């Protein structure tokens, strides 16, 4: 997915098995954020930053939707434990990750493996990718602020 690309309407299924449609958020920006794993330190920090700034994001017309390869049950536990007010898409088959280019080769302690690159796509109310934050550019503890700064 590149800047200017039109995002498909069907994004996937959420933690409750309901379809997540881009058109569900008509007139809003969508911060579609891909993260590696529920209940890990960085992912929890990022989700909680978005939770803590959720009202401000909504005031600015931004909807938050998370995506990871975790199961619906894992997402439900994560939402309950962290009291997250937004939906999480189940991408266990990695269709969305592949389409958005977030499934990449990573290296940890010299070992190469495939994994999800922490990435946020800011999608305009017209359905186009307008901003992309990838990898180390995503500041997990300041992510809401980063999103808001892109809209300024």
Image (cartoon, helix red, strand yellow):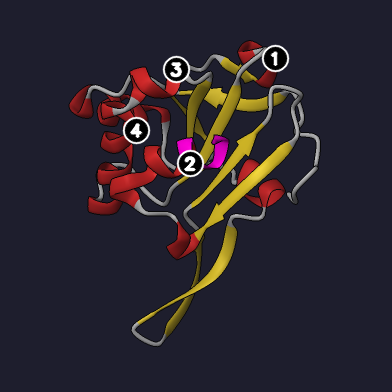
State the extent of the magenta-drawn residues as a range: 148-152
Q: Is the magenta stretch mostly helix, strand or loop?
A: helix
Q: In this view, does 145 lie to the left or right of 127?
A: left
Q: Residues within 10 Å of mark 3 (few under 14, many from 20)?
A: few
Which of the two marks, 2 or 1, is nearer to us in this view?
Answer: 2
Q: Which quadrant: the C terminus?
A: top right
Of labels 4 and 1, earlier in sequence is 1
Tell me the tag on residue 149: 2
Label 2 close to label 1 by CB (< 8 Å): no
Q: Residues within 10 Å of mark 1 (few under 14, many from 20)?
A: some
Tell me the tag on residue 23: 1
Which of the two marks, 2 or 3, is nearer to us in this view?
Answer: 2
What residue appears at the point 47 percent right and 35 percent down from the top-left corner? 148
Of labels 3 and 4, earlier in sequence is 4
**Cα distance, mark 4 to mark 1?**
22 Å
What residue appears at the point 71 percent right and 40 percent down from the top-left corner? 129
Dot 2 falls on a residue whose secondary structure is helix
Q: Which of 103 and 46 is in front in this view?
A: 46
- From the top left corner, tell me how far across and down residue 114 is, in percent: 52, 67
**Cα distance, mark 2 to mark 3?**
14 Å
Tell me the tag on residue 50: 4
What is the residue that sits farthest to the front in this orientation? 152
Residue assigned mark 3: 58
Of labels 1 and 3, earlier in sequence is 1
85 drawn magenta: no
Dot 4 falls on a residue whose secondary structure is helix
151 drawn magenta: yes
- From the top left corner, tell me how far across and down residue 29 is, in percent: 60, 25
Q: In this view, does 75 lie to the left or right of 8?
A: left
Dot 3 falls on a residue whose secondary structure is helix
């Amino acid at each position: 997915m590149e800047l200017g690309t039109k995002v498909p309407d069907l994004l996937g299924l959420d933690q409750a098995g309901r379809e997540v449609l881009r058109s569900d958020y008509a007139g809003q920006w969508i911060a579609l954020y891909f993260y590696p794993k529920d209940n890990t330190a960085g992912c929890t920090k990022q989700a909680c930053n978005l939770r803590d700034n959720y009202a401000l994001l909504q005031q600015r017309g931004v909807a938050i939707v998370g995506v990871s390869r975790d199961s619906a049950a894992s997402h439900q536990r994560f939402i309950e434990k962290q009291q997250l007010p937004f939906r999480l898409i189940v991408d266990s088959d990695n269709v969305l990750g592949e389409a958005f280019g977030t499934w990449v080769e990573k290296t940890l302690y010299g070992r190469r493996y495939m994994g999800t690159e922490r990435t946020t796509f800011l999608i305009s109310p017209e359905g186009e990718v307008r901003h992309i934050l990838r990898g180390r550019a995503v500041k997990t503890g300041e992510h809401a602020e980063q999103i808001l700064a892109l809209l300024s």
